[in-house]
């Protein structure tokens, strides 16, 4: 019996796809951008904490402060935008 020699082509004549070495989906800068966005998200949620009252019969007007109504949601939206940018940014190709 003769041994079959593999030449890198399929029997139908099509060449096999060349696969790149194992590479991560993101670059180092992408991970830094994503971590910065997650940091902004954590900051936004921290800014939203508080303003409640232990006694349910007592109203605390601090719940409607500008920090909780405006600053925290804007920080959260900015954090989500930064994370989305970090995911969508294409990594630089090293050649």
Image: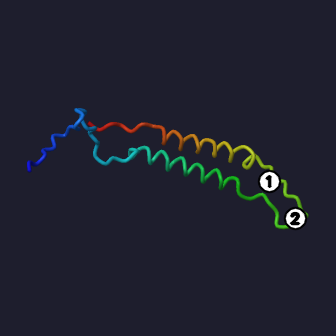
Question: Tag 1, which secondary structure?
Answer: helix
In the picture of the structure, the residue carrying the numbered disc 2 is: 56
Residue 5 lies, in percent from the top left, at 12, 44
Q: Is residue 45 left or right of residue 35?
A: right
Q: Give the image quarter of residue 15.
A: top left
Q: Residue furthest bottom?
A: 54
Between 20 and 46, the one lying in front of the other is 20
Residue 90 lies, in percent from the top left, at 42, 37
User: Is tag 1's residue or tag 2's residue first in the polypeptide sequence?
Assistant: 2
Q: Residue at x 24, y 34 (%)?
A: 12
Q: Residue at x 26, y 39 (%)?
A: 18
Q: Residue furthest right?
A: 57
In the picture of the structure, the residue carrying the numbered disc 1 is: 63
Q: Residue at x 48, y 42 (%)?
A: 87
Within 10 angstroms of label 2, few (less than 14), some, or many (20 or more) residues?
few
Specify how the rendered protein is coloured. Answer: rainbow
């Amino acid at each position: 019996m003769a041994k079959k020699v593999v030449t890198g082509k399929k029997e139908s004549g099509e060449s096999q796809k060349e696969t790149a070495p194992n590479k991560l989906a993101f670059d180092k800068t992408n991970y830094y951008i994503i971590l910065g966005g997650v940091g902004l998200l954590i900051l936004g949620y921290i800014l939203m904490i508080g303003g409640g009252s232990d006694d349910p019969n007592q109203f605390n007007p601090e719940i409607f402060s500008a920090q909780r109504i405006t600053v925290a949601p804007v920080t959260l939206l900015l954090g989500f935008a930064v994370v989305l940018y970090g995911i969508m940014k294409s990594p630089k190709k090293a050649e």
